């Protein structure tokens, strides 16, 4: 129920543009990855798709849902890069002990990586992880993707945990699907 409230809040604040969203066989996607994706992320990708919010924050869809002409790197490439960066420059914490716990689902225009900390058996409980482009300890947010995005673009999470060129909360955010961008 709480996840429904979160997507409703985001839809009200930032309606998806016409024709947005990625369609596909989520069972096949999850089989290819070997796990179930968090339900709020699945709903976001289904309604909004892959794209950018105010040219500052990108959300990527699983490679298996995207056509060959989609922007790269895809989710697999971003995840590999995030894991490599964590191994090179990250600082393990009590929460984030290994790079294998990280799956990337987005990023910022200033090079921060957004992902999940894949702990526990329930993907709907995976917290959001922010890896700074400058290295250091990752920041963990005990929330799902949709609540995190809403908090950032509404200005409710302040200061913003990701570098951006906009001041979140000053005006309604705008999502641009990758095909329109």
Image (cartoon, grey):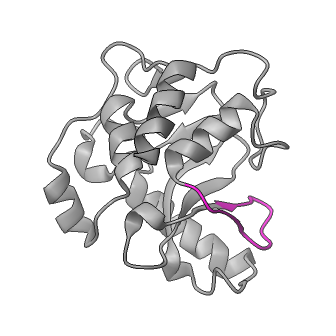
Q: For the magenta stretch, what is the residue range?
A: 130-143
Name the residue at 37% across, 78% down.
121
- Per the image, is 71 magenta? no
Q: Compared to 79, does 163 lie above or below?
A: above
Left or right of residue 140, residue 143 in this image: left
Q: How many marks?
A: 0
**x, y (%) of residue 41?**
40, 48
Residue 132 location, quadrant: bottom right
Residue 85 visible somewhere in the drawing? yes
Q: Residue furthest right?
A: 159
Name the residue at 25% across, 73% down.
34
Left or right of residue 135, residue 149 in this image: left
Name the residue at 58% across, 29% down.
53
**x, y (%) of residue 79?**
48, 64
Q: Main secondary structure of the magenta part?
A: loop
Residue 14 visible somewhere in the drawing? no
Q: Compared to 9, does 83 lie above or below?
A: below
**x, y (%) of residue 76?**
39, 61
Q: Compared to 125, does 157 lie above or below?
A: above
Left or right of residue 33, residue 91 in this image: right
């Amino acid at each position: 129920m709480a996840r429904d409230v979160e997507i409703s809040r985001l839809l009200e604040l930032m309606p998806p543009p016409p024709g947005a969203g990625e369609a596909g066989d989520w069972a096949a996607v999850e089989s290819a990855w070997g796990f179930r994706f968090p339900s709020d992320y699945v709903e976001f990708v289904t309604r909004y798709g892959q794209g950018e919010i105010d040219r500052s924050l990108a959300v990527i869809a699983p490679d298996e849902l995207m056509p060959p002409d989609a922007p790269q790197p895809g989710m697999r490439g971003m995840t590999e890069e995030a894991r490599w960066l964590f191994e090179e420059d990250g600082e393990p914490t009590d929460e984030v002990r290994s790079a294998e716990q990280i799956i990337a689902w987005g990023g910022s225009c200033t090079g921060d990586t957004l992902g999940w900390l894949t702990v526990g058996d329930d993907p709907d409980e995976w917290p959001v992880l922010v890896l700074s482009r400058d290295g250091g300890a990752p920041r963990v947010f005990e929330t799902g993707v949709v609540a995190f995005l809403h908090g950032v673009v509404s200005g409710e999470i302040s200061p913003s945990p990701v570098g951006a060129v906009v001041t979140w909360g000053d005006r309604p955010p705008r999502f641009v699907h990758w095909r329109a961008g």
